[in-house]
Amino acid sequence: MDHTKTPSAPNSASQADVPLAHVVELRILLTVFAALIMLTAITVAVSYFDFGAFNLSVALGVATIKATLVALYFMHLRYDNAFYATIFVIAVGFLGLFLGITMLDAVEYYPDVQTWQQSTR
């Protein structure tokens, strides 16, 4: 197999005008990176505080913001077709729904788990 071949030319003039990727300015990438580092520091700082019933909500909120920044800027979702952003929002919504249902179930059985843990000590 000959590996020295160059890629074939585009079939039409319209394909030649389409860039292969969106180039994001370094300033934007560094700003998003700094925001991610700051959010990571917030995640660590929040772990030292007791928010009671909101501990998980705060942790998931910060994680959701971080994941959204990664998807928007490092995965170029912000600059892509709006359809893909819609699919992303729907997926995050369903994830929230599934986690919410799971948490309702966990809260329902929490007293039973605590009773069992105390009886095994």
Image: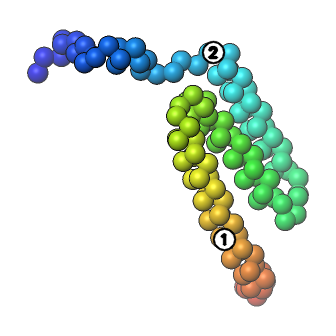
Label 1 crowd (10 A; few <14 / some 14-19 / many >=20): few
Quadrant of residue 18 in the image?
top left
Read off the residue under disc 1.
101
Query: Is tag 2's residue or tag 1's residue first in the polypeptide sequence?
Result: 2
117 lies above or below 46: below
Read off the residue under disc 2.
26
Q: How many labels does the image show?
A: 2
Q: What residue type is labelled 1?
A: Ile
Mark 1 falls on what kind of element? helix
58 lies above or below 31: below
Residue 10, percent from left and from top: 27, 16
Q: Residue at x 83, y 60 (%)?
A: 54
90 lies above or below 83: below
Q: Which residue is drawn at 76% across and 37% down?
A: 39
Q: Which amino acid does label 2 sit on?
A: Leu
Label 2 crowd (10 A; few <14 / some 14-19 / many >=20): few
Give the residue at the far left of this rendering.
1
* Residue 82 or residue 88, whichever sits in front: 82
Residue 92, percent from left and from top: 62, 52
**Whole-number angstrom distance, CA of label 2 to CA of label 1:** 41 Å
